Amino acid sequence: YREGSSLNARLIAAVVGVALLLAIAFYLGRASVPTGHAGSAATPATSSGNGATRTENGVPVGYPRSQRGAVSAATNYTRFLGGPLILQPEAARAALTTLAAPEAKDKLLKEFEGNLAGIQNGSQLITNAARGVKVAVGSYPLAYHVNNYSSTVAEVSIWSMAVLAEDGQLAPTQAWDTITVDLEWTNGDWKITSDGTSPGPVPALTQSGPQTKQLPTQLRDYQSYNYATGP
């Protein structure tokens, strides 16, 4: 079961819900928004265990033609395009163009533009981040399932949690989703042809803690782990 046209749809749902709460009473590599734009030059990949051999436009590319390579490509797609790059539209567009299969670029870019508009209209997060407000957006994959694999196409579902927060405005908010990514082997690499998001499963929250709109140290200064994908 797949609902929605893009992995960023979950962020739209989160920020629209938050906007309603604000009106009545008062959410993807690093957690806080980077200060610079990703470059276009190809450089060696810095992530260990992700299967990529280099980076282009700030995202890992160059995966092995194997099941693990397909899983790594799908996982990094959800991490990078569901993370801080959302707050840098030009860098995100360049990254998406790099990761998308040639015949899917126009469709994925159109969906991405609609998602960006939804995020901006729901919360002004992109504008606020550009103004220097500390905004945290992170996408954290937890588990995956290979639905289909061959040497030419693959489909991978990833259970993931997203965290969204804005300093002084929005306490850390979570979203749990299963993201299904379709890929094809083209031009010597795994490329994205489509993605879809279905909600949950959502764990029952039994832990309580202080809630504050100030961006916590863990989202401001801590570094995200790089993820290895399977044995």
Image (spheres, rainbow, N blue to C red):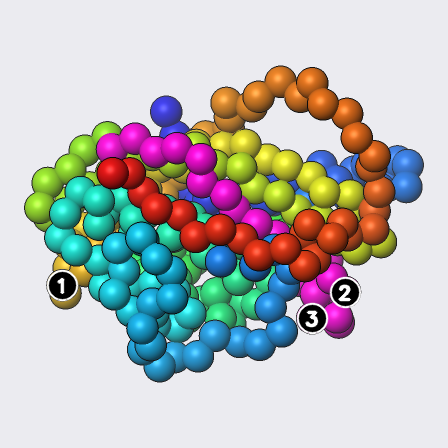
N-terminal of the two: label 3 or label 1? 3
Label 1 crowd (10 A; few <14 / some 14-19 / many >=20)? few
Tell me the residue at 68%/59% (across/down): 221
Q: Give x and y (percent) for residue 53.
A: 25, 65
Q: Amino acid at mark 1?
A: Gly
Quadrant in the rendering for residue 13: top right
Amino acid carrying mark 2 in the image: Val
Residue at the far left: name it.
151
C-alpha span from label 3 to label 2: 7 Å
> Identity of the amino acid at label 3?
Ala
Residue 204, percent from left and from top: 62, 18
Q: Which mark is residue 188?
A: 1
Q: Which residue is mark 2?
A: 133
Residue at 57% across, 76% down: 36
Quarter in which the N terminus is drawn: top left
Rendered residue at 56%/42% (across/down): 162
In the rendered image, the vertical position of residue 6 relative to residue 197, given as above or below: below
Residue position for label 3:
130
